[in-house]
Image (tube, coloured by chain):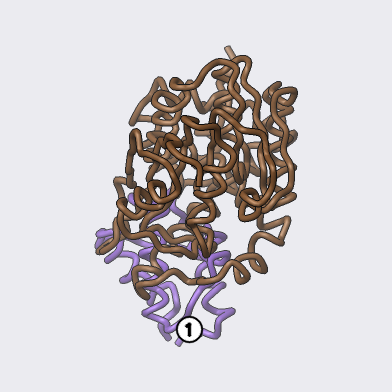
């Protein structure tokens, strides 16, 4: 089974241009170089495309960690597979 | 020695809003002395107005506001048009919600100096507009929102007075709370009024008018310039700002060129004395639009 964190990892690596980036559910912007408010939106759009979902502005603003993003994807019906 | 307001804000942002810190640092580095000179009193007023946990509330609002702006700009990049087209849509979703407006206004308040390009506009306002005014002018501020622009003018002009008209009760509450916090309340009055009706009513003839970032929220921007003309004496000066190809949830009139704002002003009986168009240095990846904020200093040359 491929977990969501495994599915998200290539997207994070591409956006933040870091092939060695390792994600955990506790990973936040403090842990990833370049994860500012603009790159956050670039990341969100890439995740929307990858999983065919759409986030509200409030959801985008409130996301703090990779764990939050996974929980939100679960809420939108995206499952580990 | 205790930490300054700016030092405490930056420390709080590093811990709680790490996505905002690059932009804050950029603004601070763009004009370090002016940043401190403007941010410290702005933050002091904010702390007095909001009370306990002021920075937590205000910086949280700023982070959400910045995120909302970025996501709106990303949707605009994809669709080629602003999300909303009518004032009624925005009225339902934004202006009529005290909670949304409160958060929005505190976010905008901090963006006056935490966004480097808006700090640049603040300096243009202070150094090129306020310095042209006499010490005891009457200023009319149309849609003061948080009130920070007009209060900054009052702080510089020791005998000036200000009357602000805003459609939003929440705006009047926040602007009044900041006027009290800054010790400027005896020279600032705020009244609830729709900017679109100002030209239909008798008002004091002012030497100066301020109207910041309202025009892009309107279906009929020409009426706003008519209102600004109406409240000014002949030769009176106005500071007028607008957003170009810069989306937000409640921006409905899409200005694409700086010349559109010039034309609006000239058609409403003003001559443009100076202007400044600024943009963020960092953009969304692959952006085709450059989101700009433009300020114009206008002089009334004829009544309309």
Q: Is residue B303 left or right of residue B124?
A: right
In this view of the protein, can residue B67 be seen by the observer? no
The residue indicated by pointer 1 is A80
**Chain that the image shows in brown:** B
Q: Nearer the viewer, residue B194 or B79?
A: B194
Quadrant position of residue A17: bottom left
Image quadrant occupied by the N terminus of chain B? top right
Rendered location of residue B300, percent (x, y): 45, 36
Q: Residue at x 29, y 61 (%)?
A: B289
Picture layout, residue B242 above or below residue B204: below
Mark 1 secondary-structure assignment: loop
- Disc 1: CA contacts within 10 A as few (<14), some (14-19) or many (>=20): some
Picture layout, residue B233 above or below residue B245: above
Rendered location of residue B252, percent (x, y): 49, 65
In this view of the protein, can residue B48 be seen by the observer? yes
Total residue callouts: 1
Q: Nearer the viewer, residue B265 or B301?
A: B301
Rendered location of residue B268, percent (x, y): 45, 48
Q: Is residue B36 left or right of residue B51?
A: left
Rendered location of residue B157, percent (x, y): 56, 18
Q: Nearer the viewer, residue A22 or B298?
A: B298
Q: Name, please, the residue furthest toward the front.
A: B303
Q: Residue at x 42, y 41 (%)?
A: B270
The subunit carrying tag 1 is: A
Q: Nearer the viewer, residue B67 or A10?
A: B67
Q: Name, please, the residue furthest toward the top.
A: B1
**Chain that the image shows in purple:** A
Q: Residue at x 31, y 49 (%)?
A: B282
């Amino acid at each position: 089974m491929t977990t969501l964190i495994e599915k998200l990892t290539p997207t994070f690596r591409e956006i933040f241009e870091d092939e060695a980036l390792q994600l955990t559910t506790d990973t936040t912007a403090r842990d990833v170089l370049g994860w500012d408010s603009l790159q956050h939106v670039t990341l969100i759009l890439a995740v929307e495309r990858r999983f065919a979902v759409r986030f509200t502005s409030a959801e985008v603003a409130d996301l703090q960690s990779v764990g939050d993003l996974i929980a939100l994807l679960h809420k939108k019906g995206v499952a580990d597979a | 020695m205790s930490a300054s307001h700016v030092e405490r804000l930056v420390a709080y942002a590093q811990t709680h809003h790490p996505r905002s810190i690059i932009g804050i640092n950029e603004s601070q580095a763009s004009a370090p002395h002016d940043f401190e000179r403007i941010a410290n009193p702005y933050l002091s007023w904010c702390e007095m107005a909001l009370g306990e946990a002021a920075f937590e509330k205000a910086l949280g609002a700023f982070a959400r506001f910045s995120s909302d702006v970025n996501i709106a700009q990303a949707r605009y990049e994809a669709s080629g048009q602003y999300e909303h087209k009518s004032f009624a849509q925005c009225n339902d979703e934004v202006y009529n919600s005290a909670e949304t407006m409160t958060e929005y206004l505190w976010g905008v308040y901090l963006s006056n100096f935490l966004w480097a390009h808006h700090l640049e506009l603040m300096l243009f306002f202070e150094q090129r507009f306020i310095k042209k005014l006499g010490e005891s002018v009457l200023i009319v501020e149309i849609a003061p929102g948080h009130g920070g622009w007009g209060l900054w003018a009052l702080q510089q002009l020791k005998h000036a007075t200000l009357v602000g008209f805003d459609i939003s009760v929440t705006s009047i509450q926040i602007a009044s709370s900041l006027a009290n916090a800054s010790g400027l309340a005896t020279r600032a009055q705020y009244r609830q009024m729709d900017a679109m009706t100002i030209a239909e009513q008798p008002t004091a003839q002012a030497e100066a008018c301020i109207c910041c970032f309202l025009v892009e929220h309107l279906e009929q921007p020409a009426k706003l310039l008519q209102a600004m003309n109406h409240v000014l004496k002949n030769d009176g000066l106005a500071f007028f700002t607008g957003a170009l190809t810069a989306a937000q949830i409640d921006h409905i009139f899409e200005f694409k060129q700086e010349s559109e704002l010039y034309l609006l002003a000239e058609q409403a009986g003003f001559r443009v004395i100076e202007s400044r168009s600024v943009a963020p240095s960092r953009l969304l990846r692959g952006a085709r639009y450059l989101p700009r904020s433009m300020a114009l200093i206008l002089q009334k040359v004829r009544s309309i």
